[in-house]
Image: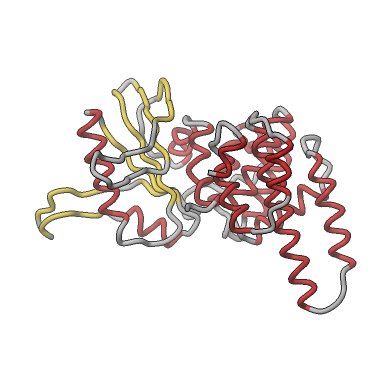
Amino acid sequence: MPSAQHEALHRIFQEEPSLFSRAFKALDIPFPEVNSAAVVNADLTEILPIERRVDTLLDLKSEAGDHLIVIESQQKRDRAKPPAWAYYISYLHAKYRRGVVLVVICQNAAVARWARRPKSIGLPDMPTMTIWPIALGPDNVPVIADRAMAAQDVVLTVFSAITHAHSRRVNVILEALAAALDTVEVDDAGFLAEFTEVGLGDTKARQLWRRMMSTGTYRYQSEFAEQLRDQGRKEGREEGREEGREEGREEGQVRGETRSILLLLERRGVPVSGEVRARVEGCADVAQLDTWLVRAMSVTTAEELFG
């Protein structure tokens, strides 16, 4: 099951399909002016019982023609991925008869460099197919640290933040993002703030973002911010054995995952019944909550969280 962090890296393009175009412009990667962009069913399963599913698939129409954009989230080097990418490209090209572009999103610069290297199939001196992925990572995605620039494109700033989750300068991106969120609608800001937390994954940046959301005075902060603030005061006063501190951290993680699930459903407009809320709030299994958090990004009913 993909992690919530993995999902956030590519799902931000589902929330705003045109984001990739703005990311390309920031990197001076030439691409025709896009007239429209739509999310496509990412299931590439064949009749045979072999499941093949891309992370995100976009259908773009531009002045230069129609293209499909395959967006893959990649956390580490994986020898099995290039053959899978070759399959995705060939299958989609054969099925839709249009150009296919592979974009790989990474949070690690070394992984991004590996991903963007050409990958060939066939003879060393005469490859049958060569894949040239476009890799976006902390080594080429711009650091948006200026508040005015962040306010001009808040979603791109979110992407900058989650891509630089392990970077030293992520703190200045988060500061710019926090201020920029005050310039958009409260509901949108709340959703993007939660999306950022999910995308940062299990990093120090995520802890910093939570502290900013619990101690700041941003107008978009939702009710859970006060809960986090109270939690922080209590944890700051806790003293005792290491075992007690570990239990406190685990309880805090459970509460954080629980509120993330419920808030994400709320931001997406998915009704949550009392029964669903009780089941989510009553779960103390962090792994199970993380699974539900991933599902909360795409379910149409709250009951679908449970499979």
In percent of width and height, residue 169 lies at 62, 56
What is the tally of numbered marks visible in this picture? 0
- Which residue is located at x 87 percent, y 53 percent? 230
* Residue 63, above or below 27: above
In percent of width and height, residue 222 lies at 78, 38
Q: Nearer the viewer, residue 130 or 257?
A: 257
According to the image, what is the colour scheme of the structure?
A: secondary structure
In the picture, measured across the screen, residue 200 lies left or right of residue 282, that is left
- Which residue is located at x 84 percent, y 52 percent? 229
Q: Nearer the viewer, residue 210 or 153?
A: 210
Q: Nearer the viewer, residue 63 or 214?
A: 214
* Residue 279, above or below 79: above
Q: Which residue lies furthest to the front in this view?
A: 275
Q: Which residue lies furthest to the bottom in this view?
A: 241
In the picture, measured across the screen, residue 170 lies left or right of residue 41, that is right
- Which residue is located at x 42 percent, y 62 percent? 110
* Residue 77, above or below 103: below
In percent of width and height, residue 140 lies at 46, 50
In percent of width and height, residue 132 lies at 28, 48
- Which residue is located at x 40 percent, y 24 percent? 34
